[in-house]
Image (cartoon, rainbow, N blue to C red):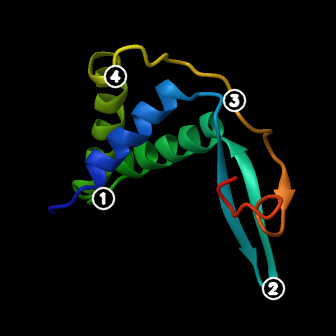
């Protein structure tokens, strides 16, 4: 398999180190109910990483993709202290509240706040 998913996983790992208290807007769709929920990045990315790790360790032929995700995530976390811009602080504070729910994703500003 050839793809960029390992590099994207590295970006997620770097984001987790730079903004561990950051929040991510998640689209939730349940039949006719549509919501945008703000979830802490630590929880969302932690669960995503555990899912990738469990899939890679599962018996049978898991393929290369899951290990590429796990490896990319870890390498992204390891390299961010060396590759970040000078003056960019690590472990930045949150800029929004966690677990807030809205239909449109904010006060008319779109789902990204």
Horizontally, is 86 left or right of 34 in the view?
left
Considering the image in quadrants, where does the N terminus appear? bottom left
Q: Are marks 2 and 3 in contact (CB under 8 Å)?
A: no
Q: Earlier in the sequence, mark 2 or mark 3?
A: 2
- Residue designated by label 2: 32
Tell which tag, 4 or 2, sits nearer the viewer.
4
Q: Is residue 75 above or below residue 56?
A: above
Q: What whole-number distance in Å separates the C-alpha atoms at marks 3 and 1?
A: 40 Å
- Residue designated by label 4: 85
Q: Is residue 60 above or below residue 89?
A: below
Asked which secondary structure carries label 1, the reply is loop
Q: Residue at x 41, y 14 (%)?
A: 87
Residue 63 in percent (x, y) is at 24, 58
Q: What whole-number distance in Å separates the C-alpha atoms at marks 2 and 3?
A: 31 Å
Tell which tag, 4 or 3, sits nearer the viewer.
4
Residue 94's label in the rendered image is 3
Q: Earlier in the sequence, mark 4 or mark 2?
A: 2
Q: Give neighbour class at mark 1: few <14, some 14-19, many 20+ (Cα, 10 Å).
A: few
- Residue designated by label 1: 60
Q: Give neighbour class at mark 4: few <14, some 14-19, many 20+ (Cα, 10 Å).
A: few
Horizontally, is 91 left or right of 71 in the view?
right
Asked which secondary structure carries label 2, the reply is loop
Q: Give neighbour class at mark 2: few <14, some 14-19, many 20+ (Cα, 10 Å).
A: few
Q: Residue at x 40, y 32 (%)?
A: 14
Residue 58 in percent (x, y) is at 39, 51
Residue 40, quarter of picture? top right
């Amino acid at each position: 398999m050839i793809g960029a998913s390992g590099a994207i996983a590295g970006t997620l790992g770097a984001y987790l180190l730079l903004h561990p208290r950051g929040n991510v807007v998640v689209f939730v769709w349940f039949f006719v109910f549509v919501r945008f929920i703000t979830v802490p990045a630590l929880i969302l990315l932690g669960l995503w990483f555990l899912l990738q790790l469990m899939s890679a360790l599962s018996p049978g032929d898991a393929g290369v993709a899951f290990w590429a995700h796990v490896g990319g995530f870890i390498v992204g976390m390891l390299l961010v202290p060396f590759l970040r811009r000078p003056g960019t602080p690590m472990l930045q504070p949150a800029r929004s509240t966690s677990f807030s729910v809205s239909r449109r994703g904010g006060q008319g500003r779109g789902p990204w706040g």
